[in-house]
Each structure stands twice: as structure tokens, then as C-alpha cells.
Image (cartoon, rainbow, N blue to C red):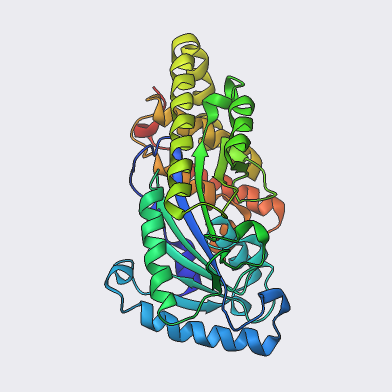
Amino acid sequence: MSIKRILLDIPRWMQGEAEESDIVLSSRVRLARNMVDLPFPHLMTAAQAETFLQRMAEAVQYVNQDDLISQHGPMVLYRVADITNLERQALVEKHLISPQLATGGQNRGLVISEDEVLSVMINEEDHLRIQCLFAGLQLEAAWQLASSLDDALENRLEFAFQEQEGYLTACPTNVGTGLRASVMMHIPALVMTKQAERILSALGKVGLVVRGIYGEGTQALGNVIQVSNQVTLGQVEGEIVANLTAAVKQIVAQEQLAREALMTNNRIQMADRIGRAFGILGNSHVISSEEAVRLLSDVRLGIDLGFITGLPASVFDQLLVQTRPGYLQVLAGQELDALERDVRRAQLLQSKLRSGDNMPS
């Protein structure tokens, strides 16, 4: 299974529908783990990092024999040093690795299951970052599967754990459970009705944090945000997952109310906005990444509100990735300048959206 094939395949979380998937695009659980007999990655020697990569290769062979893990296809280990810069960028765009891992260095690795539901970053900030990614609001299921992979790995590796502090991590904010649960949400109606800032600012009071589409330090492109837990110490995993799920359901309810208000009070204006967005995306010959994502948000809202028929809602999730710079260049098989990317992006959008069956009604 080559990296290029992984990049060009549509992952499981971008296919089909799940609970609250009209607003919650995906659920992710990430577990930070470190070895008891090694210093944290930023203190390791090259020899220690290489030794751990080899230990992980053996551990991956073991976890592939697990009945639950094997349902997601074989997990394969890749060395980051063997992945091109463009491919690394595209992996970030597909939410499979962090920008920090993409900047690389020697002796870093990535493990990915065939359906891309499970992945593990090796020698990033921590020795292991175990990740499970599902469509819609499925935090509980994501946690259970990530925990199963964690258990399988712990049968082969000894993690740094203390009874009082919990799992030890390179960053103090991850000490304890080492669990970061997050959801990616599409909230255009709250943004349009100017309620988003008020609602999202209240999340900090309950131990949650809002970030951009690619995590810490990134922008909320296309009205898409990430909401995650901020505290891992002093809480059990189930409590973290339950608290985030409850908060997300409240945001979902507010977004649904805002959409209903737009349909009641501004139906004609909404139809015009969505129709214009669809028209530009389907007929442009040159379009920037920022404009494409902004207009795709309107198109996705148009699908959810019934203005656009014959087009699956999942096309928004897919095009969020496929129109990004790294993906376009991987698809082209070469580096492209800004104009070339804008042209190819427009061509891709035309091929996906221009169909008589998909026109806004």
C-alpha cells in the first residue's frame, strides 16, 4: 500500500453518513504515549529513535493479528524520511499527521490502517500518538477503538505510567489520560447570524478549546472548526468523551436553530447565496484555495437545507481536502506554482459539481 494510494483514496470518514453528520464532520480521539525506557523524542539520540522505530515495526506486525484492528485492513509503517514534502503536506491536509510531524527530521514514522480510520505518529512530540478518526459524532466509538489499539500496543511495549499522575507526556497539558478528543464541525449558520463567537467563547469555561481546521495555530476555514478537550489530568477517559459529546450536541442544537431562522427569515437571500456559490465553483477557470473553501461551505449548507439535490453531502468533506495545495500537487505528480494550482482546482471543482442533476433548486 503506497503512500500515494493512501493520499488519493477517499477515507472511510469521508464516506456515508453518521449521527449529526450534517454539522459534525468527524470525530477524532488521540492518545499520547511514551516509553518507560526512553527519553522524550526531543531528547532522544538518533540511535535511540531508530531503535524505537524498529521496535514499532515489530509491534505493528503483532497488532495486525488482533481481530478488531484487522477489520480496518492491515496497518503499515512508513518512514517520514521516505515521504516527499508534497506527500507530507497532503497527509496533513487529510488529517493523518500533524504539521509538526510533517516537518520531519530523521527517524520519525507513521502507521496507517488501510481504511485510514486508525493511525499512529511515531517520534513526534511523544513517542506515540495513537489516532482514531470516524465520520459524524462518534466520539465514544472512536475512543473504544483507539483504546483497543492502545491495549494491543501495550502488550508489546511498556508505556511510561505512574499511579498518581497517569501517562507521562512531553507536554504537561497531556499528562494523565493522554487523551485528546476532538470534533470537526461545520457551523455556517451560527457564523452568518453572528452567534458563533458568543457560543464558542463559553466553551473555555467548561474545559474545552476551539481551534482551526488543522488544529492549534490554524484558521477556521470554510466555517469549519475543531472543538476539543483542554484538560487530561484529573479526569477519566469516559468523562472527557462524555463532556465533549454533551457540549457538541448543544452546539449542534444552536446551529440547527440558526439554520431554521435563516430558512424562515432569509430564504430567498439564502437561495441566492447558495446558487451564486454553486455557479462560481462550477464555472470558474481559476480559483484560490481560500475562495473555494468559503464557497464550498455555502454549497454544503445548500445540500443540507435542500436547495441542492443529487449531490452527496460527503462531497464537501472530500473537496475540503482535494482542493488543498498539497493534494492537488500529489494528484498532478509534480510541484505547481500558485496559478497552476488555481487552474487545476477550478478544473477539479467543475468535474465534481457541473451536472444538470445537481443544480440548485
Residue placed at 31% from the left, 79% from the top? 65
Question: x and y percent of residue 159 in the render?
Answer: 52, 75
- Locate residue 111, reporting x and y percent: 48, 73
Q: Residue furthest top?
A: 265
Quadrant hosting residue 34:
bottom right
Q: Nearer the viewer, residue 67 or 274?
A: 67
Q: Residue furthest left?
A: 67
The answer to whether one can see residue 38 in this image is yes
Quadrant into which the N terminus falls: bottom left
Q: Is residue 296 above or below residue 105?
A: above
Is 339 on the left or on the right of 16, as rendered?
A: right
Above-or-below relation of 361 to 252: above
Total labels drawn: 0
Q: Nearer the viewer, residue 259 or 236?
A: 236
Question: Residue 188: horizontal and vertical position, in percent?
Answer: 54, 29
In the displayed structure, would residue 186 be above or below residue 176? above
Residues 45 and 246: in front is 246
Q: Residue at x 48, y 24 (%)?
A: 254
Instruction: Tell me the residue at 63%/79% (across/down).
Output: 81
Quadrant of the image occupied by residue 62: bottom left
Give percent across and percent down for residue 173: 64, 56
343 versus 298 height, above or below: below
Quadrant containing the C terminus is top left
162 and 202: which is toward the camera: 162
Residue 169 placement, left or right of 238: right
Q: Is residue 292 visible?
A: no
